[in-house]
Image (tube, rainbow, N blue to C red):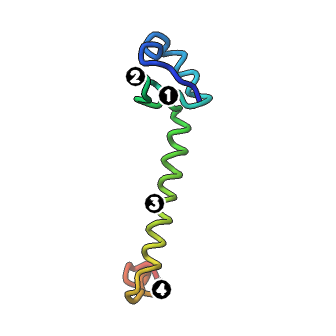
Amino acid sequence: MSTMTVTQARENFSEAIATSALEAVFIQKHGENAAVLISPQRYEELMDALEEIEDIAAYDAAMSDPSPNIPWEEVKRQLGLA
């Protein structure tokens, strides 16, 4: 993790981008974290991980639903897939 002030990031933007390819760069304003600069690859990894977490939460919610379930074969038949 790297830290820069807003002024440092503005003055050394190319360096901040280069550093973000290796690690997150926290941009501080008045001593508080105001933003985080990360590489596009890391951003995609984080979004994929978040999607997986949301999928798991949806699965858990569906599995805990006490209402009757529709068998997978019936769903496929209704959708014209079987």
Q: In this view, does 79 lie above or below 31?
A: below
Whichever of callouts 3 and 4 sits on the residue coming sooner in the sequence is 3
Q: Which mark is residue 29?
A: 2
Q: Look at 50% across and 65% down and name the residue there.
A: 56
Identify the secondary structure beneath mark 2: strand
Q: Distance between the residues labelled 2 and 4?
A: 57 Å
Q: In which quarter of the image is the N terminus?
A: top right
Whichever of callouts 3 and 2 sits on the residue coming sooner in the sequence is 2
Q: Which mark is residue 54?
A: 3
Dot 1: within a 10 Å radius of its alpha carbon, few (fewer than 14), some, or many (20 or more) residues?
many
Q: Residue 65 carries which label?
A: none
Dot 3: within a 10 Å radius of its alpha carbon, few (fewer than 14), some, or many (20 or more) residues?
few
Q: Mark 4 points at which residue?
A: 73
Q: Which amino acid, mark 1?
A: Phe
Q: Marks 4 and 1: in contact by CB < 8 Å?
A: no
Q: Which amino acid, mark 3?
A: Glu
Q: How far apart are marks 1 and 2 (CA)?
A: 10 Å
